[in-house]
Amino acid sequence: QVRLVESGGGLVQPGGSLRLSCVDSGDTFSSRGMGWVRQAPGKERELVAAIGWSSGSTYYAHSAKGRFKISKDDDKKSLYLQMDSLKPEDTAVYYCASQSQLYGTVGASLRDYGYWGQGTQVTVSS
């Protein structure tokens, strides 16, 4: 029902930008809130950005505010994360996640997400 595949990760220098993409091959993308979650080595997963099913509401972690922007395109069944002014501490595996509940409010907790992609590595280093 939900199958998420991320792309767009890579190596970037500090201060650079990356745009992550996630495509859902299922048929409920437009009805679900989505999020981007990252996990750095030795650290817990962190929800960095989320968007409601209608794109009317967004959530950003403090670490992402002002630098990251989340968006979704229902026609393309795609989720995006534009990351600017990247820092070495942004290095992590980034996961696309879909909420378990249809038509829910924007999910600001990891518990809201029941579907996950395989992740894409982002490395910020000079």
Image: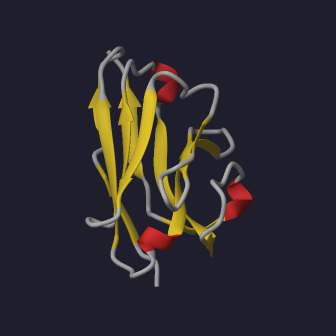
Q: Nearer the viewer, residue 38 or 41?
A: 38
In percent of width and height, residue 110 lies at 69, 55
Specify whether 7 is left or right of 51: left
Residue lying at 62% horizontally and 44% vertically, measured from the top left: 47
In percent of width and height, residue 38 lies at 54, 44
In the rendered view, would you say 98 is above or below 61? Answer: below
In the rendered view, would you say 96 is above or below 43? Answer: below
In the rendered view, would you say 93 is above or below 27? Answer: above
Residue lying at 56% horizontally and 38% vertically, measured from the top left: 40
Residue lying at 68% horizontally and 48% vertically, measured from the top left: 108
Q: Nearer the viewer, residue 45 or 59?
A: 59
In the rendered view, would you say 12 is above or below 1? Answer: above
Q: Nearer the viewer, residue 25 or 71?
A: 71
Q: Nearer the viewer, residue 55 or 1?
A: 55
Number of marks in the rendered image: 0
The colour mode here is secondary structure
Location of residue 76 by image quarter: bottom left
In percent of width and height, residue 55 lies at 47, 53
In percent of width and height, residue 49 lies at 55, 42
User: Split into 4 quadrants, where in the image is the C terminus?
Assistant: top left
